[in-house]
Image (cartoon, rainbow, N blue to C red):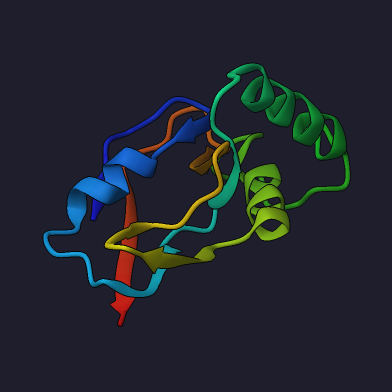
Amino acid sequence: MQLPPMSRGYHLITRHIEAEIDHWPRAGLLYVFIQHTSAAITINENADPSVRTDFESVFNHIVPEDLPFLTHTLEGPDDMPAHIKAAMIGHSLTIPISRQRLNLGTWQGIYLCEFRDHASSRRLVLTIQS
């Protein structure tokens, strides 16, 4: 599936993923894999947007863009920090399916973690095992 380009930050994409599945099995597992090295996916709070703002602040503090020892800088100052952040958060999720729907917790949502200032659309691979 192809996500539209999104600004830098943490974006809820649960509904995008749910809309891609034509037929949900009664029970199974959904595997989600992002085919990029400068963005990530994770599951976290889906209600209060300040959580996503705080994620951005914390990761920018942990991996700032002005590290003088970085050598991979050809694509801009946000590129190598984006790779590091993506490696820290991860590239795949496994989510249980129960009663023909994702079995997420009440306050859980799937995030696209976009670390680039000017990212293009992002590709996800969705696989269901029933």
Measured from the top left, where is residue 5 in percent x and y? 32, 33
Q: Residue at x 38, y 65 (%)?
A: 98
Residue 76 image-quadrant placement: top right
Left/right of residue 30 with respect to residue 83 in the rendered view: left
Q: Residue at x 73, y 56 (%)?
A: 88
Q: Is residue 32 visible?
A: no
When the figure is inspected, residue 76 is found, relative to residue 126, above or below; the finding is above
List the single residue furthest toward the bottom: 130
Measured from the top left, where is residue 12 in percent x and y? 45, 34
Left/right of residue 125 with respect to residue 114 in the rendered view: left
Left/right of residue 23 with respect to residue 5 in the rendered view: left
Q: Residue at x 23, y 56 (%)?
A: 1
- The quadrant the C terminus occupies is bottom left
Left/right of residue 21 with respect to residue 34 in the rendered view: left
Measured from the top left, where is residue 4 in percent x and y? 27, 36
Q: Is residue 8 visible?
A: yes
Residue 77 image-quadrant placement: top right
